[in-house]
Amino acid sequence: LCRGGLAERLCRLQNRERSAISFWRHQCISDDKIPSDKSGVLIVKILEIFEECTIQVAICQQLEQSPAALSPEDAVINAEEPILKVLFTRETAAHLKSRPQDVIHIYPPWQKLLLQNADVPVIMNTYFSQKVLLSEHSEAREKTYGLTKMLIRKNIISLAQTFRLDDIDDKLHQESSDNQVACAPQTHNNGDSKRHPLALSAVNDSLLEMVESQGAVGWREVQVRVVIQRVYCLPAREGYRSHTQGNKPLLSNGGMFCRLCLLVQDAYGMFSEVQLQSLSSTDDIEQYFRRWEGKSCCLAGMKILQRTTRGRALGLFSLIDSLWPPVVPVKVPGQSQDSEMMTTNLPSPSFCYILTVQSGEIHVEVDEEEQISNLYQPPAVHGLKEILRIDGCNERCSFWAKVLYRRLQTKHSVPVDQREMLLFVTDSTLQNVVHGIPKVVAVSVTVSCVLSMEVIEALSAGSRLVFFKDALWGNGRIICVERTVLSLQKPLLCSAAGADLSELTGPVRLDELDSTTQASSVCALRGTVVGVNESTAFSWPTCNRCGNGKLEVCPQDRELLYCNQCSEVVTTPVLKMQLEVFLSCPSLSQSTVKVKVWHEISIALFVLLTMLLFLQTYEVQSVLGKEVGLLNCYVHSVTSHPNCVALEEIILL
């Protein structure tokens, strides 16, 4: 808001007004009595209630007194006073929970409005109102009514009737039972919804209207119909496990607990994130992705966890921006819903409500039999070549790629299960490129990106095709962050956007090492051996069954080795060796290339390693000048002073 502008002043005035009302109500509850100051208090008895233009209208008769000894039925009515039409806002009406025959005290500053050609005065500004219970009979009646619903008539006034147009459609002002909405105080009994069918009967289509009418504490009487745009998991905060339903364990992501979340959108285009709490570690996460995305659902029993803005939740709003504008016209508040509204000029959402379930009660009814909603926007799948050419920053992207190699970031101070992971991927759009674009790109998977056990096990087993949904692209990097989903199956619905999604055929090629190669990348290497670092050469035995490299001396026979993982004696251990060699590469004639090689994956250097490590009489000079390549390598570092490239030989998945 502009500083000092009318909007800012109005916002401050509304905040002060809400604070004054809340303080007054709190004071009345704390005192547990009606305020003693009766000067200017208007005492009315409700005769009839109906709703018009979201305002609750009460037809009342003024009372000249309301003695504590009398019940509302015995209260004295002043016949000389005209009948009053009292207006209550939606918030005030929800607080009073009024019914016919109730006595209401309206405290100043209420106002009386006299309309021309109307005999009934209108009472406005009724924020400071209190319902009076004058006897035990009334209190018992109030408790009884608290468990039941009352249907309030809702008058629909057409604009044609308001402006006295000639083509009035009589159907617009007919009152029918379909226009009645359920309105009653909140009930906190878990079984009420079963005993009272109307408890969840009213369905709304506006998230914002529900938040404004029901407040931050949540709603139970009504439902909101929304479309599920995305399903994903978020890592839970510390201590979140203790608040889960029944203290069940949630999905584990490297020791962290996670929760299932829905990004939903209503008919007006507003988004909200719903955080659920009942995700078991044994549940198949992908079933929620495939069964729920694109379907309509009704939310009930929600409460507001947070109202967040673009500046506070960049990741959430980058996902929302990828779903904006809507694919179909959405409703616009205050305008005719029959007209086709343009979706291209609508401003993107600037805030979003984070909702959560109330005290373990989950009310998310997904109609899985229903067709995919027209409002649903499936992920737009692009080829990696097209993604690398995107100019924007913090853009969400989805792609289908083959994972060739994975590597944990080497931060020794951080536990292994909390380190970021690099996945090197490629697709047909990169493999068919001649020059200018790398054939393999790195995808950084942060700790906040929750991976299912199925994906983790698949990546450990070998090279797999993986679908990356809603990854983040910016500053030349693809990052999997919160709300990014990795799946082994293609989505049921996706927009290919003209991308080449053909499968890879033939062997995968890596870019050869040259002056454009950067650190933390993979490349292919060929060259001539010009030096050997003998001080770093070492070997160690490993188990021939499980590959365990920490073998122990067998207690029964000191000449044999023992594997703790297999619990068996290792009679034929596999010897692994490591050595650093210096190569001269034609593509980098001015740089020193240092490669860490392993004999079990380097067939080309196996003979070299064997001679250097075990034939003590063999001269190193005799292996210099040997040709090496092609080796698949990971680039550790690239320095210019001095010109040096440090690599490590790797094996692709």
Image: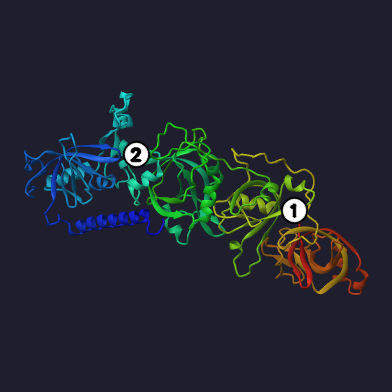
Asked whether 508 or 252 is in front, the reply is: 508
Q: Does the rendering let one see residue 618?
A: no
Indicate the amino acid at tag 2: Leu
Residue ID for mark 1: 438
Which image quadrant is residue 576 in? bottom right
Q: How many callouts does the rendering have?
A: 2
Asked whether 48 or 300 is in front, the reply is: 48
**Residue 15 located left or right of residue 75:** right
The image quadrant where one finds the N terminus is bottom left
**Residue 34 located left or right of residue 278:** left
Position in image of residue 121 (x %, y %): 16, 40
Colour mode of the rendering: rainbow
Residue at 74% x, 48% y: name it.
430
Are dots 1 and 2 in contact, CB under 8 Å? no
Q: Is residue 240 above or below residue 188?
A: below
Indicate the amino acid at tag 1: Pro
Which image quadrant is residue 158 in? top left
Asked whether 204 or 107 is in front, the reply is: 107
Position in image of residue 218 (x %, y %): 35, 49
Q: Which mark is residue 350?
A: none
Q: Does the rendering let one see residue 402?
A: yes
Task: Estimate how packed mark 2 is, as few (under 14), some (14 to 19) or many (20 or more) residues with alpha carbons within 10 Å.
Answer: some
Which image quadrant is residue 114 in? top left
Residue ID for mark 2: 200
Q: Nearer the N terminus, badge 1 or badge 2?
A: 2
Position in image of residue 521 (x %, y %): 72, 59
Task: Estimate how packed mark 1 is, as few (under 14), some (14 to 19) or many (20 or more) residues with alpha carbons within 10 Å.
Answer: many
Looking at the rendered structure, the secondary structure element under dot 1 is loop
- Per the model, the C-alpha gap separating discs 1 and 2 is 56 Å
